[in-house]
Image (cartoon, rainbow, N blue to C red):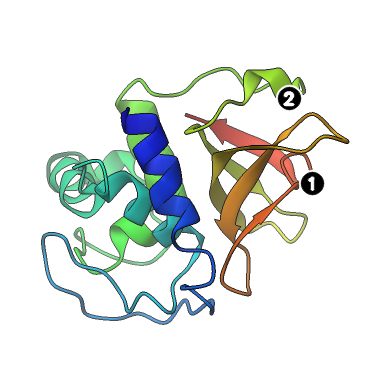
Amino acid sequence: NKIAEMVNAARAQIGVTLEYDPIYRVIKYPNGDVPMVTGVCADVVVRAVRAVGVDLQRIVHEDMKTNFGVYPQRWGLNAPDTNIDHRRVPNLMTFFERQGKAVEITKDPADYQPGDIVSWQATSGSYHIGLISNIRMLTSGRYLIIHNVGNGTMIQDRLFEWEIVGHY
């Protein structure tokens, strides 16, 4: 089951990816990655999806090469960059929407199932992304999210902590 594989790949990052580091790095292409001990929130998703044979670095880059103008233009770039584009939440959101993967955003925890990818806009205005796990909190009834919000990859009950702006 690809969903279970993806969730397990995200869970495998817990205790391994111990830091949050948004520094720009030159990485190989395709299938490039920053060192596993570090990364950003998008890296959790990129690594989980890659475990089921989908290289977001490659497919986001290919879409951006031919559709650059529909992607957010907030980084002052004139062309796609294989080192960073797939590591930026607004680019992933645009890509998932372009692929028809967006589903309804609701306040009902039952609508968020294991393997779903969720993006948020934090109160600071920054974007965040994570993956719905297969572990449900008994107290809230919500599935926990797997994400890296600043201290490495963690699994937490924070689904509704910020404004949800994407659900895929």
Q: Is residue 87 above or below residue 52?
A: below
Horizontal side of residue 134 vs 3, given as left or right: right
Q: Residue at x 57, y 56 (%)?
A: 147
Q: Residue at x 20, y 75 (%)?
A: 27
**Quarter of the rendering occupied by the N terminus:** top left
Q: Which mark is residue 109?
A: 2
Check disc 1 and report its element: helix, strand or loop.
loop
Q: Between 91 and 143, which is closer to the camera in this rendering?
A: 143
67 versus 79 height, above or below: above
Task: Examine the image and state in which quarter residue 113 appears.
Answer: top right
Front residue of 130/86: it is 130
The amino acid type of the residue labelled 2 equals: Pro
Tag 2 secondary structure: helix
Q: Residue at x 44, y 78 (%)?
A: 38
Marks 1 and 2, the one that precedes in the sequence: 2
Residue 162 visible somewhere in the drawing: yes
Residue 61: horizontal and vertical position, in percent? 18, 51
Instruction: Determine whether, in the image, residue 11 is placed left or right of residue 24.
Output: right
Q: How far from the left and from the top, in percent, is residue 56?
A: 25, 48
Up/down of 112 relative to 10, above or below:
above
Q: What residue would you read off at disc 1?
A: 161
**How far apart are the alpha carbons under marks 1 and 2?**
12 Å
What's under tag 1, amino acid-wise? Glu
